[in-house]
Image: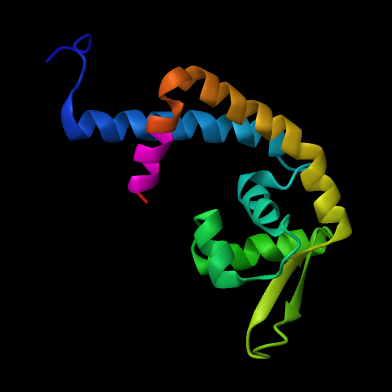
């Protein structure tokens, strides 16, 4: 196989998905880049917390796709910037919930339209196949 020949099969699919994910993440990273923005992982945290609910660290780690120790550092930075705060869970005092602050929700609201623009571009690039592609990707979860 030469470099000009298209790859096929599972390795090609994995490579194509990886490249697409990388490009999308880089586009979003440009929007949420620190020092003014929260960074990509911080954005994922703020995006989950934008629902106004408190979430346990384990749920946030899964949503942000980071290991628990890494999430602790991310949340610490967001706390230092006044974007989130921790509070014991009223239902289970052993568990801590993380909430967005007013400042965190304002930052999320300011960044969200630009992120939505990237998402719209992705859907436009997928065209009529967008629903099928998204459904197939959801099955990979």
Q: Is residue 138 found inside the magenta-colored segment of the image? A: yes
Q: Which residues are magenta?
A: 133-140
Q: Which residue occupies the foreground of this view, 77 or 43?
A: 43
Residue at point 37%, 35% (across, down): 18
Instruction: Look at the picture and state if 97 lies above or below 99.
Output: below
Instruction: Answer with the quarter of the image where residue 132 lies.
Output: top left
Instruction: Look at the picture and state if 81 lies above or below 36.
Output: below
Query: Horizontal and vertical percent for residue 111?
Result: 76, 38
Residue at point 73%, 60% (across, down): 77
Instruction: Answer with the quarter of the image where residue 87 lies.
Output: bottom right
Query: Horizontal and vertical percent for residue 41?
Result: 61, 50
Please tell me how many numbered marks the rendered image carries: 0
Residue at the top extreme? Answer: 4
Query: Horizontal and vertical percent for residue 99?
Result: 75, 67
Q: Which residue occupies the foreground of this view, 90 or 37?
A: 90
In the picture, measured across the screen, residue 16 lies left or right of residue 66, that is left
């Amino acid at each position: 196989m030469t470099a000009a020949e298209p790859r096929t099969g599972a390795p090609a699919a994995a490579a194509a998905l990886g490249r697409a994910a990388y490009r999308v993440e880089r586009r979003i990273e440009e929007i949420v880049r620190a020092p003014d923005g929260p960074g990509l992982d911080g954005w994922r945290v703020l995006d989950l917390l934008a629902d106004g609910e408190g979430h346990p660290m384990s749920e946030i780690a899964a949503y942000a796709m980071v290991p628990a120790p890494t999430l602790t550092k991310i949340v610490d930075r967001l706390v230092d910037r006044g974007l989130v705060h921790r509070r014991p869970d009223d239902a289970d005092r052993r568990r801590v919930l993380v909430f967005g602050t007013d400042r965190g929700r304002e930052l999320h609201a300011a960044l969200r339209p630009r992120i939505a623009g990237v998402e719209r571009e992705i859907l436009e690039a997928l065209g009529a196949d967008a629903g099928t592609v998204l459904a197939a990707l959801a099955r990979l979860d």
